[in-house]
């Protein structure tokens, strides 16, 4: 396995979807390739960043609540 | 409101019940539709349409389902529908944001460690805002795969159903979206912590 294949398989690897024999080849390459280790760390960090970027609470403007309630009355 | 109260409000279908539902859930759903449509007016419209759809479909609400999950899916559908009706422009290529390799399959360059753990960096409001901006820069079909899978938490099959595509297409787009987002975040995360 080379760096390109490690990159191609990263999603499956992170999701635990790779068959054991491919994981073995993956581990052999990553074990001797610091570039791929760092790339994999950054791929995982990117997933974590997406999740963490949207945790702020969202206030609802009063006018939106009013508009929804009005629309519901009309729908009823 | 807890799940039991929400379910009771939906089943009753009364104005009071739905008003309580709106007051309890509108904020969460607005956050969802903002992530998908990217502009405030469409996001608000989508939330309103989602509640009207939910009200009309209240008889079909299954007793086993969670109201929050049911509403979440309705809101995502309403937001995706807004997105589809928006004036479409040709999607930009994602190729330039993907990693490059030498003919022998090695990376063309090395990668420096990111300066600070992501969870620590994301605790700062400006960093979270930066990540949201970079997600917005992704070409639409890739951004949607990332938003539905990594942020909204849908399964591959659910995301494929919502997007009207195949599970394999979702997997490929998600992977490419993550690779591209890594490229976009890299200049901001490597180097000294700010």
Image: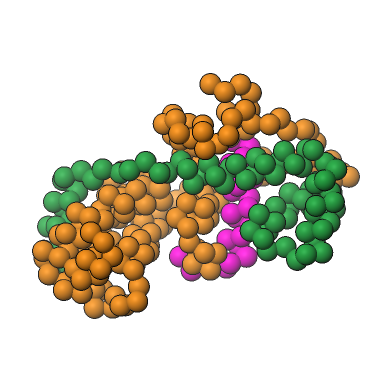
Chain colours: A green, B orange
Q: Where residue A24 sits: x, y (%)?
A: 82, 58
Residue B108 coordinates in the image, percent (x, y): 80, 36
Residue B47 locus on image (x, y percent): 28, 55
Left or right for A75, reference B168: left
Instruction: Name the residue: 70% across, 44% down.
Output: A40
Residue at the image point whose x is 26% and y is 73% from the top: B57
Tell me, yes or no, whether the highlighted magenta stretch contains residue B91.
no
Residue B155 relative to residue A28: left or right: left
Examine the residues drawn in magenta and state their main secondary structure: helix
Nearest the eye: B165 or B131 = B131
**Towards the viewer: A19 or A6:** A19
Q: Is residue A22 left or right of residue A66?
A: right
Q: Residue at x 16, y 45 (%)?
A: A62
The residue shown at (20%, 71%) is B8
Asked if one can make out residue B165 in the rendered structure from this viewpoint, the answer is no
* Range of magenta residues: B160-184
Is the residue B4 above or below the residue B32 in the image? below
In the depicted structure, whether residue B131 falls above or below residue B162: above
**Nearer to the camera, B89 or B123:** B123
Count of labels shown? 0
Residue A18: tell me if it is visible.
Answer: yes
The quadrant of the picture occupied by the N terminus of chain B is: bottom left
**Which residue in the rendered view is the most extreme toward the right?**
B104
In the image, residue A23 lies at what x, y percent? 78, 59
Instruction: Specify whether residue B183 is painted magenta.
Output: yes
Q: Is residue B117 left or right of residue A4?
A: left
């Amino acid at each position: 396995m080379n760096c390109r294949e490690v990159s191609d398989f990263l999603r499956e690897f992170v999701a635990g979807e790779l068959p054991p024999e491919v994981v073995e080849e993956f581990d052999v390459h990553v074990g001797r390739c610091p570039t791929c280790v760092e790339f994999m760390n950054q791929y995982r960090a990117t997933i974590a960043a997406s999740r963490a970027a949207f945790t702020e609470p969202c206030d609802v403007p009063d006018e939106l609540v009013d508009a929804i309630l009005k629309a519901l009355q009309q729908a009823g | 409101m807890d799940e039991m109260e929400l379910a009771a409000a939906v089943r009753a279908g009364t104005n009071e019940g739905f008003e309580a539902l709106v007051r309890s859930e509108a904020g969460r759903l607005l956050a969802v539709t903002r992530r998908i449509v990217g502009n405030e007016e469409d996001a608000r419209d989508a939330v309103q349409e989602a509640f009207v759809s939910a009200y009309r479909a209240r008889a079909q609400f299954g007793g086993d389902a969670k109201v929050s999950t049911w509403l979440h899916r309705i809101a995502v559908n309403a937001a995706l529908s807004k997105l589809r009706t928006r004036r479409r422009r040709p999607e930009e290529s994602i190729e330039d944001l993907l990693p490059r390799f030498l003919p022998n399959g090695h990376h063309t360059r090395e990668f420096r460690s990111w300066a600070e753990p992501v969870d620590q960096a994301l605790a700062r409001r400006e960093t979270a805002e930066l990540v949201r901006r970079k997600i917005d820069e992704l070409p639409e079909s890739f951004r949607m795969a990332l938003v539905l899978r990594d942020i909204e938490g849908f399964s591959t099959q659910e995301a494929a159903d919502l997007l009207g595509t195949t599970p394999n297409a979702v997997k490929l787009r998600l992977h490419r979206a993550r690779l591209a987002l890594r490229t976009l975040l890299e200049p901001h995360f490597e180097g000294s912590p700010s």
